[in-house]
Amino acid sequence: MGRSTMQHLNAQAKATGIGFTAILMWATLALLTTLSGTVPPFQLTAMCFTIAFCIGLGLWFKQGGHILHHLRLPVPVWLLGIGGLFGYHFFYFIALRNAPAIEASLIAYLWPLLIVLFSALLPGERLRWFHVVGAIVGFVGAGLLVTQGKSLSFNLQYGMGYAAALVCAVTWAGYSVLSRRVGAIPTNAVGGFCGVTAVLAWGCHWLFEETVTPVGSEWLAILCLGLGPIGLAFFTWDYGVKHGNIKLLGSLSYAAPLLSTILLILCGLANPTWVVGIACLLIVGGAVLSARGKG
């Protein structure tokens, strides 16, 4: 194995590790959202993405140059970024409002599996059987966590909600995979996407929701959301999918609901069950299987 090949693999492994930090941050999403109180979803999204935009501003100031310079991006890149960040959250909330939360969440969580499948369309990527099987095993594990081992009941009257959840999954998977096609665009461009997403979320909030003012520690939870799972995570995820092992990141994404459940159990907000144990084995096993090979 040549030196250049080793350097490439090391760089890819580092980028994959950076991308995995996004998954770790998303594992705190349920806990922090619970602690944020009764703030409506679009208002919470708007507040968090406003904080995320501030992260982008910090990166731009550190890099130097006029802010407008960092916003001079091709129109397709803007459409991809805004469609990914705002589109995902918009359709997710539509799904939850028009279908039972368990079924909608399970459909929406098809995105890691779709990332693995869509990655086959990327130049230089090769989809192998163990990538697909590993992602499916991880999805089954995530499904156990979402349903708590109970049976599902899909009803046609919630068709709009199910469709929105599927669009949600396709949107995030498509955004993640297509981001690799625009790998030359610097990761700090995510700051601009967060800013526009914040504006759109504020608009949806004012149109569809009543404003709720957070109190006490709820402000801290919202700040942590904006700094972590709905903030920095989008920057590290962007870097990971652009430069890391995207198929492995897709499979590893199923660790998010598992780690989230474990965190809730440790904080006394959920109970340990046999379902969690089996889900743990499935998700870890799926990730190990998907990690076979070099790409």
Image: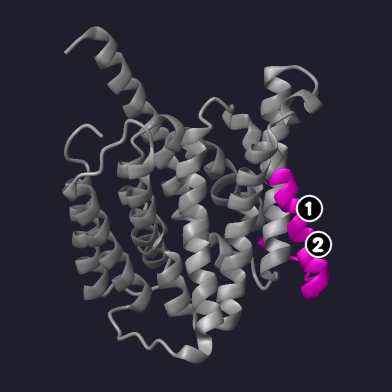
x 64%, y 40%: residue = 76
Tag count: 2
> In terms of depth relative to the viewer, which is nearer, 4 or 44?
4
Residue 29 placement (x, y as % from top left): 51, 58
Q: In which quarter of the image is the C terminus?
A: top left
In the image, residue 293 sits, relative to residue 118, either above or below, namely above
**Label 1 vs label 2: CA separation?**
6 Å
Residue type for callout 2: Gly
**Which is the main secondary structure of the residues drawn in magenta?**
helix
Residues in magenta, as a range: 194-218
**Residue 293 horizontal side relative to residue 246, left or right:** left
Residue denoted by label 1: 199
Q: Where is residue 60 in the image (x, y as percent from the top left)?
A: 71, 26
Q: Closest to the observer: 160 or 38?
A: 160
| Image position of 224 with respect to 37: above or below | above
Crowding around mark 2 (Cα neighbors within 10 Å: few <14, some 14 to 19, many 20+) is: some
Looking at the picture, tell me which residue is in the foreground, 262 or 140: 140
Q: Name the residue under label 2.
A: 203
